[in-house]
Image (tube, rainbow, N blue to C red):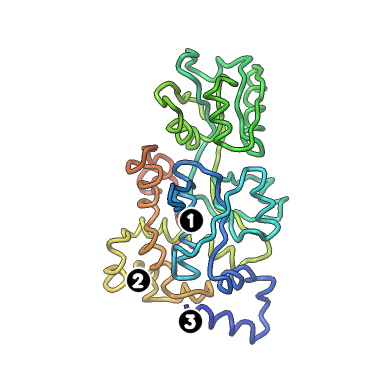
Amino acid sequence: MKRMISVIATGLALGLSFGAQAGTLEDAVKRGSVSCGVSTGLAGFSQKDENGKWSGLDVDVCRAVAAAVLGDADKVQYKPLTAKERFTALQSGEIDVLSRNTTWTHTRDTSLGLNFAGVNYYDGQGFMVSKDLGVKSALELDGAAVCIQAGTTTELNLADYFRANGITYKAITFDTSDQTRAGFESGRCDVLTSDQSQLYALRIGLKDPSAAVVLPEVISKEPLGPVVRQGDDAWFNIVRWSLMAMVEAEFLGIDSSSVDSAKADGNPSQKRLMGTEGDAGEKLGISAEWAYNIVKQVGNYSESFERNVGQGSPLKIARGLNAQWNNGGIMYSSPVR
């Protein structure tokens, strides 16, 4: 922590442009917390329990950034945001980072003044219907009423898919995922469409989850990941590499239980990530133990995945595309060197 503050102080003394390039880091250090935008409640990704504690795959990205920057994964201020609110909150500086099941698209990356810092979940849009409807394929949904969450990529994907297949639908939009689920459960629509991960999360929230089925079609690519404002490269690098550290730790065989031995007696790649060799932390303007703190306090990517959305969770989603690149998936970190 002292070293991190020293880096910032030195930069200011030398007249470096921290105002343009690292303002968010400086603000987070002064505030003593990372302000992170999350969903209003989505099982497995970002949800708050009865004690007010947040958890989820997206929440772990927030916690990883706090561990890297402040040395404490618990120093996060969570801001629940609807899909409509999320980008404005980031653009205005209300939050430091958005980690809210948000799809990386060309338009969002080039016209909103934002940068996507990576992908923490590879997803795709699907459809959930009541078993009583007797539908086996999305191509049988001609004329259906479809529940959609407003302000998401699902709206355009849905329109493109139905138009391409010459079928019609009636859109019924809601502001939050909970409202969308309630609309589906009350019978206001025949089908609910969203990212497949969100469909599984919404299904376990139904009074009778076994009454709904997710159809086989996946109609889009939905790379989900954290977002920051453009123009602050230092903060962009920290958020990107906080996520990559979790992915790289899994690849290198380091988890929260073995992180201390990897730091002390690991191979050269493990020691570089853990900060006992090299200058990765210094190049980011933060502590040498930035990645050590992430893995020690949050875990590697596999630990986060399994407890939040995988076999250790109610969702029980298979790793699939989110498995490591050398294990049948496409999850991949650039090397720390």
Tell me how far mark 1 sits from mark 3, CA to CA: 23 Å
Disc 2 crowd rating (10 Å Cα; few below 14, some 14-19, many 20+) is some
- Rendered view: 227 above or below 125: below
Tell which circle, 2 or 1, labels the residue nearer the N-terminal end: 1
Q: Position of residue 61 (x, y in %)?
A: 48, 56
Q: Position of residue 188 (x, y in %)?
A: 60, 21
Label 1 sits on what residue type? Val
The one nearer the camera, 58 or 124, is 58
The one nearer the camera, 48 or 231, is 48
Q: Which residue is mark 3?
A: 2
For the residue labelled by badge 1, is the local secondary structure a helix, a strand or a loop?
Answer: helix
Asked if one can make out residue 331 in the rendered structure from this viewpoint, the answer is: no
Label 2 sits on what residue type? Lys
Circle 3/circle 2 CB separation < 8 Å? no
For the residue labelled by badge 3, is the local secondary structure a helix, a strand or a loop?
Answer: helix
Q: Which labelled disc corresponds to residue 47? A: none
Asked if one can make out residue 112 in the rendered structure from this viewpoint, the answer is: yes
Which mark is in front, 3 or 2?
A: 3
Q: Which labelled disc corresponds to residue 271? A: 2
Q: Residue at x 54, y 60 (%)?
A: 77
Q: Which residue is mark 1?
A: 61
